[in-house]
Image: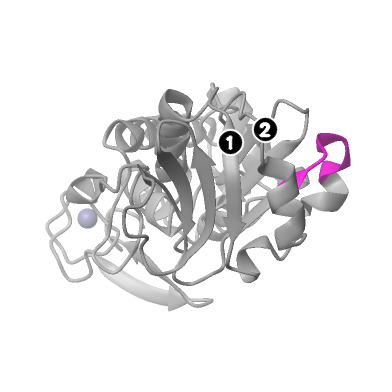
Amino acid sequence: MPELPEVETVRRGLAATVVGRPLGPVVVTGQRTVRRTSPAAVVKGLRGRTIVAAQRRGKYLMLPLDDAKLLVVHLRMSGQLRLAPEGSPRPKHTHVVVGLDRDEELRFVDPRTFGEVVVVDPARLPEEAPGIAGLGPDAWDDLASPGDLAPVLMARSRALKPLLLDQHAIAGLGNIYTDEVLHRAGLSPWRASSSLSPSEVERLHGVLRAVLGEAIEARGSTLGDDQYVDLAGGGGTFQQRHLAYGREGQPCGGCGGPIARVKWAGRSTFWCPTCQA
Ligand SMILES: [Zn+2]
């Protein structure tokens, strides 16, 4: 499932290749992808427009158009944006196709169909895209110093893992990066957020910045059973540097003991019970 580093990689790809180019014919074949409005609304909202910038908030892509509307793309579980030559075979599960100049097209591909494409009026964001309006500070763009992270942790007394996963508290983290960050910070996923000392907050902040920075540099994580690829169809490489996520039973880099796994609320948590006591 794409998280902040993967969505940021797609954003940078769009900024480099799609921003500033006129959008041509739009074809919507996946009703569920445009469920927030309708196929007609997405076709009408995009045809003839130009994407003027590529922005991101949490796991949402926010693409302002030249008529002051906003194209919002949420990849969720398995959504992909793919840039491809017009006329090349479209992958199965292609739900939206937007024509571009130079005989190329932008495709939204999504096997599990949880992803969404919507064109909204930014002034009506709270009504038209409530998921975005409720986002907490962005884990990469808005947490420059430990002082930006501390209020997020201290305002609530919640276990660290569910707190970091809560997009209303901090936007952008999912299961992979939460486990990697807590492992490298030596903090238990079940530790109460408000119990962290100032030096622990500082450590968590430093690790959060480092992990996200490295993962963005590595163009994200592409897992065997998952679907994340970038605009050109290439995978990321950060999975090769995972120290906790997906490593149940393998030796912890810190103590040599086995990485543990527990299933909670339908998700797996990977951690070292010794180093993250
Ligand atoms: Zn360990």
Q: Name which residue lies at 77% across and 54% down.
A: 41
**Side of 74 where 65 appears, left or right:** right
Residue 195 highlighted magenta (yes or no): no
Q: Is residue 123 magenta?
A: yes
Image quarter for ligand 1:
bottom left
Coloration of the structure image: one colour
Query: The C terminus appears in which quarter of the rendering?
Result: bottom left
Categorize mark 1 by other alpha carbons within 10 Å: few (<14), some (14-19), many (20+). many
- For label 2, the residue is 49
| In this picture, residue 82 sits left or right of residue 122 | left
User: In the image, residue 25 lies at what x, y percent?
Assistant: 59, 46
Q: Position of residue 274 (x, y in %)?
A: 27, 59
Q: Amino acid at mark 1?
A: Leu
Image quadrant for the N terminus?
A: bottom left
Give the x, y percent position of residue 199.
47, 30
Q: Please tell me whether residue 30 is drawn above or below residue 9 in the rendered image.
A: below
Observer able to see residue 203: no
* Of callouts 2 and 1, the N-terminal one: 1
Stretch of the chain drawn in magenta = 119-125
Q: Mark 2 and mark 1: span between their CA atoms? A: 5 Å
Residue 170, can we see it? yes
Mark carried by residue 89: none
Residue at 58% x, 29% y: name it: 22
Image x and y of residue 232, in percent: 31, 42
Is residue 52 rendered to the left or right of residue 128?
Answer: left
> Splitting the image into 4 quarters, where does residue 109 fall?
bottom left
Badge 2 vs badge 1, beta-carbon distance below 8 Å: yes
Vertical position of residue 208 compared to residue 96: above or below: above
Q: Secondary structure at mark 1?
A: strand
- Say which residue label 1 marks: 23
Depth check, front residue: 65 or 212: 65
- Under mark 2, the amino acid is Arg
